[in-house]
Structure formats: structure tokens, C-alpha cells
């Protein structure tokens, strides 16, 4: 499902400082506050996330990490989104990071069967319920996923057509039984799609081309390709400009005048 991505570069870049007593993280001098939150899934898994509240009325982006990464792999993305006034919620999928309890039972992704990974769809449902309770409508929630997180994001968007746009970093045709080809064809014409992969990740590189072609029904679809950037959020660490590029794409997708295209960036 993915390569193990390091977080050192992001931590150095963002200069993350914990604020004792407030349950928040201050990032850089831009004063981004990441509030640690938690909520329960329908099968009693406690999901932990980093939540950044955006400007009133601005979209919120739900961020789903690759395996075996954690919510912290999205720190630079959350900061850049906040610079635009957008909110964000990065969660630890079940069995990862701090989301390791089902009731009182400890759970770890290393012990998972395929069906356990597939059950991570319940983590997304719980995250959406959390955002709804914050007053965020599903029609104002955008999604970004990496590797298996990309597949999970797509599967959710395919059955929830209120989701305006989804960004897929290094998706696969199938990870742990979470398949994408049928889901891509089930997206509504009005949903926007952004596919991202690097050529040294051959499986995902070929996947985004196949998914792009399979999504011909979409008004807005775009593909971004790179050279030597690796897999999932590792691409964002190796090429930080892509963080800005993805956020700018989201801003365009938010605009009623946005149009889809196909491009390759080096």
C-alpha cells in the first residue's frame, strides 16, 4: 500500500511546537492551530485526528494517509490549506497512529486482514459525522487520500455525490481489496477529480492513466505526473511545490469557472 515516508523534512519546515494545556499545535509563524479531536465509528473504534478550523463558509478538506503513515504526514498540506482560509481534518485510520482502540481492545494495522482495511470506510463516515456536528455540510467537504487512503477516498466519493472533489495521490486499482475502477465510473459528472503519481511508482503511475480514461464522464478531471518523487505523501516531501499545486487545484475546483485538463509537471 505504500512506502514508509519520513516526516523529518516536514517537521523542520513547519517548526511544530506543542502548546501545553490547550490540546493544540502551533505551526510556523502563520499561527495555525491543530486541535486534536477524537470520535467513535459505528463499530466502536476511536478515531483520532488533527482538526484545523477554517474561515466561516470556506471548505474543509478530509485527509486520509497511506499505510503505514499517520495524520502527521499531512502537516504541510494543512498549513497551506489554512493559508487559503480552508479548514482540514487529518485522521489516523484505524490501527494507525493514535487510532488503536476498538472499545478497550488494542488494534494494529500489522495484524489486519483485508476486511479490516476495508472497514476503514467506517472511519470516513465517522469523520464526516464529526464535521457535520461542526456545522460543515458534506457538499463543502473535499477529500485527499494517499495510496490506500486514496482508494478509500474515491470509494466514499463514488457513493456520496455531494462531495465536490477528490484528490488521489498514488492510487491503485486495488489495495487490500479496496478497488477503484468501478468506483471511478460511479462518480457523478459534476464531481471533480485530480490524479497524482510519479513514474518511479510504476503501479500507481499506470493506475492514474487508467482511472483518468475511465472517468470520461467527468466535466473536471486532471492528471499530474512527476519523475522520481516516490509514493503517496512521500511525493509531497520530495517536491513541496506539489502541496501548493494541489491546493491551487482545489481552489480552482471550488470556483464555478473551473475547468478540467491534463498536464505533466516535473
Image (cartoon, rainbow, N blue to C red):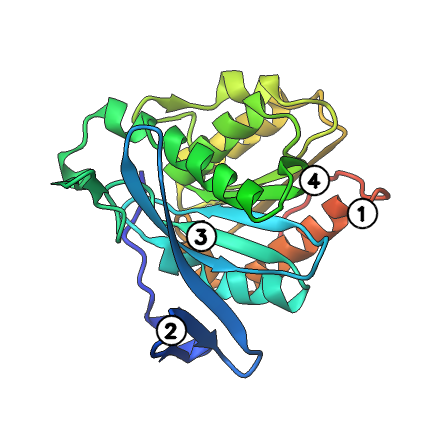
* Residue assigned mark 1: 255
Of callouts 1 and 3, which one flags the residue occurring earlier in the amino acid sequence? Answer: 3
Q: Residue furthest right?
A: 257
Of callouts 4 and 3, which one flags the residue occurring earlier in the amino acid sequence? Answer: 3
* Residue assigned mark 3: 90
Callout 3 environment at 10 Å: few (<14), some (14 to 19), or many (20+)? many
Secondary element type, mark 1:
loop
Distance between the alpha carbons at the discs numbered 4 and 1: 18 Å
Image: 101 above or below 209: below
Residue 3 at what x, y percent from top left? 30, 48
Of callouts 1 and 2, which one flags the residue occurring earlier in the amino acid sequence? Answer: 2
Callout 2 environment at 10 Å: few (<14), some (14 to 19), or many (20+)? some
Residue 144 at what x, y percent from top left? 52, 45
Of callouts 4 and 2, which one flags the residue occurring earlier in the amino acid sequence? Answer: 2
Residue 244 at what x, y percent from top left? 61, 62
* Disc assigned to residue 11: 2
Distance between the alpha carbons at the discs numbered 1 and 2: 32 Å
Q: Mark 4 or mark 3: which is in front?
A: 3
Callout 4 touching callout 3 (CB < 8 Å): no
Distance between the alpha carbons at the discs numbered 1 and 3: 23 Å
* Residue assigned mark 4: 262
Secondary element type, mark 4:
loop
Amino acid at each position: 500500500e505504500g512506502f514508509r515516508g519520513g516526516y523529518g523534512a516536514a517537521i523542520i519546515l513547519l517548526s511544530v511546537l506543542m502548546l501545553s494545556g490547550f490540546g493544540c499545535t502551533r505551526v510556523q509563524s502563520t499561527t495555525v492551530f491543530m486541535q486534536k479531536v477524537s470520535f467513535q465509528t459505528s463499530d466502536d473504534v476511536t478515531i483520532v485526528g488533527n482538526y484545523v478550523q477554517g474561515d466561516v463558509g470556506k471548505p474543509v478538506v478530509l485527509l486520509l494517509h497511506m499505510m503505514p503513515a499517520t495524520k502527521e504526514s499531512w502537516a504541510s498540506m494543512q498549513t497551506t490549506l489554512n493559508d487559503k482560509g480552508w479548514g482540514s481534518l487529518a485522521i489516523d485510520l484505524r490501527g494507525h497512529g493514535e487510532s488503536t482502540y476498538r472499545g478497550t481492545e488494542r488494534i494494529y494495522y500489522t495484524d489486519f486482514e483485508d476486511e479490516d482495511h476495508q472497514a476503514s470506510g467506517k472511519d470516513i463516515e465517522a469523520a464526516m459525522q464529526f464535521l457535520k456536528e461542526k456545522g460543515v455540510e458534506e457538499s463543502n467537504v473535499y477529500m485527499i487520500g494517499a495510496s490506500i487512503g486514496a482508494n478509500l477516498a474515491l470509494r466514499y466519493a463514488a457513493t456520496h455525490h455531494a462531495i465536490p472533489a477528490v484528490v488521489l495521490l498514488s492510487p491503485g486499482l486495488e489495495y487490500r481489496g479496496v478497488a477503484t475502477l468501478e468506483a471511478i465510473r460511479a462518480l457523478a459528472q459534476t464531481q471533480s477529480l485530480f490524479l497524482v503519481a510519479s513514474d518511479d511508482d510504476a503501479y500507481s503511475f499506470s493506475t492514474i492513466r487508467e482511472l483518468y480514461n475511465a472517468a470520461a464522464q467527468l466535466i473536471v478531471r486532471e492528471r499530474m505526473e512527476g519523475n522520481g518523487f516516490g509514493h503517496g505523501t512521500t511525493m509531497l516531501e520530495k517536491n513541496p511545490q506539489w502541496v501548493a499545486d494541489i491546493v491551487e487545484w482545489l481552489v480552482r475546483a471550488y470556483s464555478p469557472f473551473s475547468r478540467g485538463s491534463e498536464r505533466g509537471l516535473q
